[in-house]
Amino acid sequence: MHLVAPSLLAADFRHLDKAISFVNESEADWFHLDVMDGNFVPNISFGQFIIEQVAKDATKYLDVHLMIDEPGRYIESFAKAGAHGITVHAEATNHLHRVVQQIKAAGCKAGVALNPATPVSVLDDIIEDLDLVLIMSVNPGFGGQKFIYRSLAKIRQAYDLITVRNSPAIIEVDGGVGLQNAQKVLEAGARVLVAGSAVFKAEDPAKVVRQLKGISGNPLAMV
Ligand code: DX5
Ligand code: ZN
């Protein structure tokens, strides 16, 4: 079965407690938390402090997506803040292998994210070590952008690499995902759907989560 991870970035931060209870009570599986440093991406969001507050009330897995330069500097502090999984960008460090080991040593699941122009082949020498591959289907930095359709081919490539190499990694897709493309994304091999605006900007967010959970994809990708 696939997982749905609402991105809190699209929530109304004046009422963060409501957004947290909503995810807790919905059929969603994970909280997706977008950390932006204004350097790796042209936007600043939130950091360890907010994640620590979310962790106090969240009853589900905290999936932390670090869009920050040199993430190795902050792995331990995000783990301490309550992250269950930490995903770093391949483009953000010269020492991806070391950072992945750091994430695991901190007791978290390790993910690597790829920007739209970064080929899947950068994962060749690390795929066996990963718990998650995050395919960005928009340029990171902002919610509410349009899904880049080329990402479907990339999801398939990542799926093939994972299969051929017998890696335990699952594929997460992030950016512009919603009811209009979720089935295709799942069919391409994704296991986790991140949805920001599709959920939080909807009239009935719980219904959208339920619908996203109800979509059937590629049975091969869901073992
Ligand atoms: C983009 C973030 C995404 C974003 C998704 O940089 O990584 O997680 O919040 O938002 P939507 O689903 O609105 O594209
Ligand atoms: Zn994200």
Image: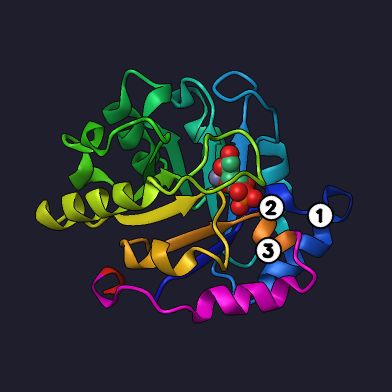
Label 3: which residue? 199
Is 2 situated above or below 64? below
Q: Is residue 70 left or right of residue 132?
A: right
Q: Secondary structure at mark 2?
A: helix
User: Is residue 113 part of the magenta span, yes or no?
Assistant: no
Q: Is residue 182 left or right of residue 163?
A: right
Is 197 situated above or below 187? above
The stretch of residues the image draws in magenta is 201-220
Separation of residues labelled 3 and 1 (CA atoms): 15 Å
Find out whether the residues at labels 3 and 1 contact each other: C-beta distance under 8 Å: no
Find out whether the residues at labels 2 and 1 contact each other: C-beta distance under 8 Å: yes
Badge 1: how crowded within 10 Å, few (<14), some, or many (20+)? some
Badge 3: how crowded within 10 Å, few (<14), some, or many (20+)? many
| Residue at screen point 73% across, 70% down | 205
Please identify the quarter of the rendering in which residue 112 is found: top left
Nearer the N terminus, badge 3 or badge 1?
A: 1
181 or 45, nearer to the observer:
181
Q: Secondary structure at mark 1?
A: helix
| Residue at screen point 49% across, 34% down | 76
Could you tell me which quadrant the N terminus lies in?
Answer: bottom left
Label 2: which residue? 8
User: Is residue 202 part of the magenta span, yes or no?
Assistant: yes
Nearer the N terminus, badge 2 or badge 1?
A: 2
